Image: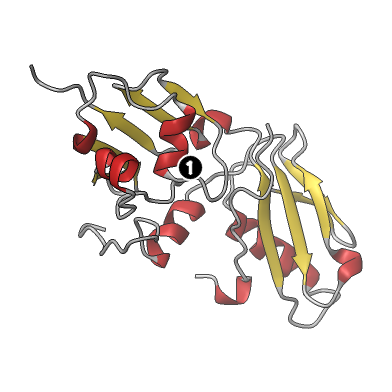
Amino acid sequence: MDIKSVIVIGMLVMAAGCSQQPVIKQGSMISNSNEVLSSAAAYYIGVDDVLQVNVWKNSDLSVTVPVRPDGKISVPLIGDVQAGGKVPMDVAAEVRKSLTKYIREPQVTVILTELRSHEFVSRIRVTGAVQSPASLPYRQGMTVLDAVLQAGGLNEFASANSGKLFRKSPEKTNQYSLYLKDILNSGDLETNYELMPGDIISVPERLF
């Protein structure tokens, strides 16, 4: 799956560790930084995902490796580390703990560079009154307009300013209004939100 550098979940282990809809600003994502981190942290690593392990000031120990069928990755000096079924922060914590035997206060970052095991978890869906309803690979920087255009644009039955964006959070599925007519016809990009993995865009038909 061509989705390199999709979700950057670089989390320093030393810094390891919504019911209200966040304020939405034009040109920004529909979330604050805490929501983004929460969504990223909920991703559980699977077999064939590719991880980048960075050890600060120790380039010889920094590697980019796939997760093996046994769920483990190999890290220089410490050997095998269990990654499957864990979130990146937990893997970084395990690497850090093992490296403390050899390095004083190591700083470890784990970045998920390729989503291979969870392809359909990360896809963007565009449904309803579009020319070609689609399930699209997520791309970093993808917006609502990008996804709608890839689905062939709106069809003649679309209620263009009644669209919805659905996004799951750990607690619930959040819903946001989309004004696609304003985006397409007036260049009003207020609701041309940047998408996140798993988002669903729904365009209803007009009531005749």
Residue 81 lies, in percent from the top left, at 75, 52
- Please tell me which residue is depicted at 56% across the width and 33% down the height of the picture: 137
- The answer to whether residue 106 is left or right of residue 174 is right
The residue drawn where x is 40% and y is 42% is 144
| Foreground of the two, 18 or 130 | 130
Quarter of the figure that contains the N terminus: top right
Going by the image, does 9 lie left or right of 94?
left
Q: Quadrant of the C terminus?
A: top left
Q: Nearer the viewer, residue 40 or 67?
A: 40
**Is residue 3 found left or right of 158 in the rendered image?**
right
Pinpoint residue 185: horizontal percent, then vertical percent.
Answer: 30, 41
User: Relative to residue 121, is residue 78 depicted above or below?
Assistant: below
The three-letter amino acid code for the residue at tag 1 is Pro
**SS at mark 1 in the image:** loop
**Of residues 126 and 12, the one drawn nearer to the viewer in this rendering:** 126
The foreground one among 69 and 35 is: 35
**The image quarter in which residue 161 lies:** top left
Q: Within 10 angstroms of label 1, few (less than 14), some, or many (20 or more) residues?
A: many
Q: Identify the residue position indicated by label 1 in the image.
A: 197
Position in image of residue 51 (x %, y %) = 72, 50
Using the image, determine if residue 191 lies above or below residue 158: below
Residue visible at 15% across and 23% down? Answer: 206
Q: Residue furthest left?
A: 208
Seen as rendered, the residue at the extreme front is 186
